Amino acid sequence: MKTILVVDDEYDLLQTICATLELGGYQPVPAGNGRAALQMIEAERPDLVLTDVMMPYMSGYDLVSEIRKLPDGKDIPTVLMSAIDPSQHPEGSWDKVLPKPFTLDTLLETVEGLIGPD
């Protein structure tokens, strides 16, 4: 089963995304902020990271930057979930931007497009 680290400070959205991923056959691991996510990456070895952009302590941009510095971090696909217009995002090393609001089908299609079905 492929593991997906889901990072969002909005608890209800985090739970909804995790439940959707479970129904899609993936193993979601929730994190409420970027700091917590960085601590989990070593232990969980996720196949994909889905992260919100606007969060306390560490933005999604900073989280992706820190992931890329890890020994295996360049190999982990990352998706930004953001209500910010995609043209307004700075240059970065994430693999995809999932514009908010998104449908749960779009979420699963995005994940499957990056790491395949589980």
Image (cartoon, rainbow, N blue to C red):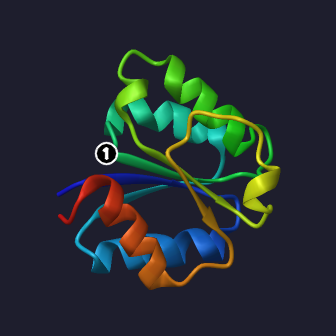
Quarter of the image with the N terminus is: bottom left
In the displayed structure, 112 sits above or below 19; it is: above
Where does label 1 land, which residue?
Answer: 47
Q: For this rendering, which residue is in front, 82 or 45?
A: 82
Specify few, some or many for label 1: CA neighbours under 10 Å numbering under 14, 14-19, or 20 or more.
some
In the displayed structure, 95 sits above or below 110; it is: above
Quarter of the image with the C terminus is: bottom left
| Number of marks | 1
How far across and down, in percent of the image, does residue 12 sit?
63, 77
Outermost residue toward the front? 87
How far across and down, in percent of the image, does residue 3 sit?
30, 52
How far across and down, in percent of the image, does residue 53 sit?
72, 51
Q: For this rendering, which residue is in front, 94 or 43?
A: 94
Q: Is residue 84 left or right of residue 16?
A: right
Q: Is residue 102 left or right of residue 2?
A: right
In the displayed structure, 79 sits above or below 41; it is: below
Which quarter of the picture shows residue 23? bottom left
Q: Is residue 86 left or right of residue 65?
A: right
* Mark 1: secondary structure: loop
How far across and down, in percent of the image, does residue 108 sit?
38, 73
Task: Name which residue type carries label 1.
Answer: Asp
At horizontal 52% and vertical 78% (from top left) the residue drawn is 16
Which quarter of the picture shows residue 72? top left
At horizontal 70% and vertical 33% (from top left) the residue drawn is 62
At horizontal 57% and vertical 68% (from top left) the residue drawn is 14
Q: For this rendering, which residue is in front, 4 or 91?
A: 91
In the displayed structure, 38 sits above or below 2; it is: above
Q: For this rendering, which residue is in front, 28 or 63?
A: 63
